[in-house]
Each structure stands twice: as C-alpha cells, then as structure tokens.
Image (spheres, rainbow, N blue to C red):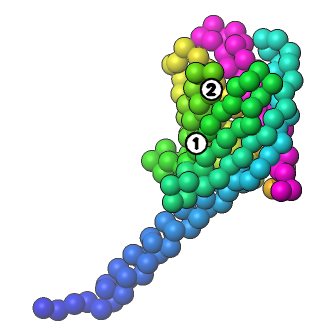
Amino acid sequence: MHFDTGKLKLLFVLATLAICVSAQSVLADAKVLERYVGKWDIRSKTLQPAAATASYQETYEWVLERKFIRGKTGRKQDGSFDIVFGTYDANADGYPFWIFSSSGSYLYLPPAKWNEREQAMDWKNPSGLDINYRSRCHFPSNDRRECYMVIKDWKGKVILEMEWTAERRPD
C-alpha cells in the first residue's frame, strides 16, 4: 500500500486547523456569555404600557459543564423573581435565552446575534408570529450593560417596552 506523504501531511494540517478553529469558536462563544457571569445591580424602567421603575439584583453563573449560563434575580418589588438560562447554539450561530418567572410566565428568546464591533447582543423573533419581540444589550464596559426591549402584537401595538441597566457588583 502506497501513501502519498504530501497528501497525508495536508490532511493532518487541515484536520488540526479544523480542530483549532472549532476550539476558537467555542472559546469565543464562551467569552461572549462570560460577560453575563457575576453579580449585578439592575435598574429598570417600564416605558409602556404604564411607566414604572424597579431595582433588584441578578446573579449569573456557569452550569452544566460551562455549556449554559444560569441567571437568578432577587425578589423584585412586585414579589416576583426570575430564572434565566442562556447558551450558544452552533446550528443557529446565536445565543438563545429562556426566562422563567415565578409569576408563571416564561419567554423564549430566539438566538441573539453578537455584534463584536458594537459590543452588543441583539434578539429578534422570526417573522410570522403573532407577537414581535426585539431586544438589545450593549456592553459599554465589562462592568455595565444597557438593555432595551419592546414586544408588539401582530397589529404593531406595543404590549411591553422596557429599558434597564446592569452594574456589576464588586462582591
């Protein structure tokens, strides 16, 4: 049996490159999610349907062998609290999040796209749904995130519009 050593070397180099690119992609994805990890002070403003403000704390940590981040809020002024899961979905090349509230509501956020240049994560639901969702979290620094969200019904009427800031806690 004859082996072409040149082709074997090329195959080895390509396989090694594929492994390195895949590892770099996983590291880059983890780096984006890592931005959420830690303890945060949240200040939120509901803009619609009725103006309101709220303050609470939020903590994110890695779970399930660093495949997911899990966030938990402290109790909010209305008595509710949330649990959040986020991950990277390679098939969608984005970051889906799931938000579960003690009020009984839940929300699936289709995979967000990370914009490296703007240091922002953008969510937008697929077209054709009865409810349209759009959100953005901008990270002006490692210790601050500024977010906005709007949910509209199929007629374009705003159901909920909010903005919030998160400041990393020193502890």
The image quadrant of residue 95 is top right
Q: Is residue 10 visible?
A: yes
**x 42%, y 81%: residue:** 13
Q: Which residues are magenta?
A: 147-171
Residue 102 lies, with reference to residue 9, above or below; the image says above
Residue at 60% over, 33% down: 99
- The image shows residue 63 at horizontal and vertical percentages of 56, 54
State which quarter of the image contains the C terminus.
Answer: bottom right
The circle on residue 102 is 2
* First reached walking from the N terminus: tag 2 or tag 1: 1
Q: Main secondary structure of the magenta part?
A: strand
Query: 41 or 143: which is nearer to us?
Result: 41
Rendering coords of residue 89 (x, y %): 50, 48
Measure the C-alpha gap from mark 2 to mark 1. Answer: 15 Å
Q: Amino acid at mark 2?
A: Ser
**Is 141 contained in the magenta span?**
no
- Give the vertical position of 44 relative to 19 (above or below): above
Q: Which residue is mark 1?
A: 85
Q: Is residue 5 left or right of residue 80?
A: left
Where does the image place residue 55, in percent across and percent down from the top left? 85, 32
Q: Amino acid at mark 1?
A: Phe
